[in-house]
Image (cartoon, helix red, strand yellow):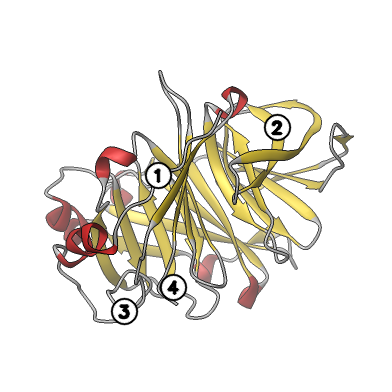
Amino acid sequence: MSARTGFTTALLMIGLCASEAIHASGILSGHRMGVTHLMQWELPKRLKEISGLALSSDHRLYAHNDESATIFELDYEHGKIVREFRIGKIKDDFEGIAVVNNYIYLLSSKGTLYKSPIGKNGERTNFQRFKTGLRKQCEFEGLTYRASTNSLLLLCKTPYKKKHKHQVQIYSWSLDSLSVTKKSTIRIDDRPILKKLHSKRIRPSGLTIDNKTGNILLIASEQKALIELDATGNLVKVIKFPLPDQHRQPEGIALSENGKLFIADEGGKHKARLSIYSQKD
């Protein structure tokens, strides 16, 4: 059911060094992302449409599919599902997941948030629904928790307003006020990113945060790229995946405290994959 593939440091670092840095420091810089190998698992069939990843404070990895409010806890050391529970009976186009304390948050493509306690295996949990008021702003695809501000970051995949056409946008939703914090909204010009990627458009598909630096890491499935921003939204670095053939459709992303980078690829006509890039000791 699972397969593991190892790769050498040399192959990965060639890909990383081939990308031009915008700033010298950050998650993706050579000394910050000293990858020694890639561990990769093929996932069970019911995770074929895996869309989002999130790590809890106790280092548990959670995932979800596109249209089902079924949450999976993954044993990422062995590529297995160890827990599976369902949030209510809801159906939506789910595009992001975050874990805050003992609660799961799911984000729909229309900007609706769902909150549920982490359930036991086989359990169906209760939930709360929050309308963020952002439905007319964007199609959303990506959610993460920023502990420093006790807020959720909502990633815009496709801006609806013409004036935001060439922007990457990240909205901040406060867990204290249960509302959007407008002054914390990040908007950056996407044209420097497009230039680096030799692409005509960028559609981010997931995000995570480095709690040590506050830097934000975006994944772009179509371009098979990673984009790093600092805490205020300044562009740090853009790279293509060093091993693009190993990523058919990268959608989910998470980053552990010890520097492990998790990438989830939808399966399409194949099995979904979970990839784990590790830093040097």
Whichever of callouts 1 and 4 sits on the residue coming sooner in the sequence is 1
What residue do we see at 45% from left, 32% from top? Answer: 266
- The residue at which mark 1 appears reads as 5
Q: Mark 3 touching mark 2, by CB under 8 A?
A: no
Q: Amino acid at mark 2?
A: Ala
Residues 135 and 270: in front is 270
Report how far apart the C-alphas of labels 4 and 3 lie in the structure. Answer: 15 Å
Report how far apart the C-alphas of labels 1 and 2 lie in the structure. Answer: 30 Å
The local secondary structure at tag 3 comes to loop
What residue do we see at 41% from left, 62% from top? Answer: 217
Q: Amino acid at mark 1?
A: Thr
Residue 252, image x, y percentages? 49, 45
- In the picture provided, is 247 more to the left or to the right than 53? left
Q: Amino acid at mark 4?
A: Asn
* 1 or 4: mark nearer the eye: 1
Residue 203, image x, y percentages? 33, 43
- The residue at which mark 3 appears reads as 31
Whichever of callouts 3 and 2 sits on the residue coming sooner in the sequence is 3
Residue 109 appears in view: no
Report how far apart the C-alphas of labels 3 and 2 lie in the structure. Answer: 38 Å
Mark sitting on residue 69: 2
Q: Amino acid at mark 3?
A: His
The number of numbered discs placed on residues in the rendered structure image is 4
Mark sitting on residue 29: none
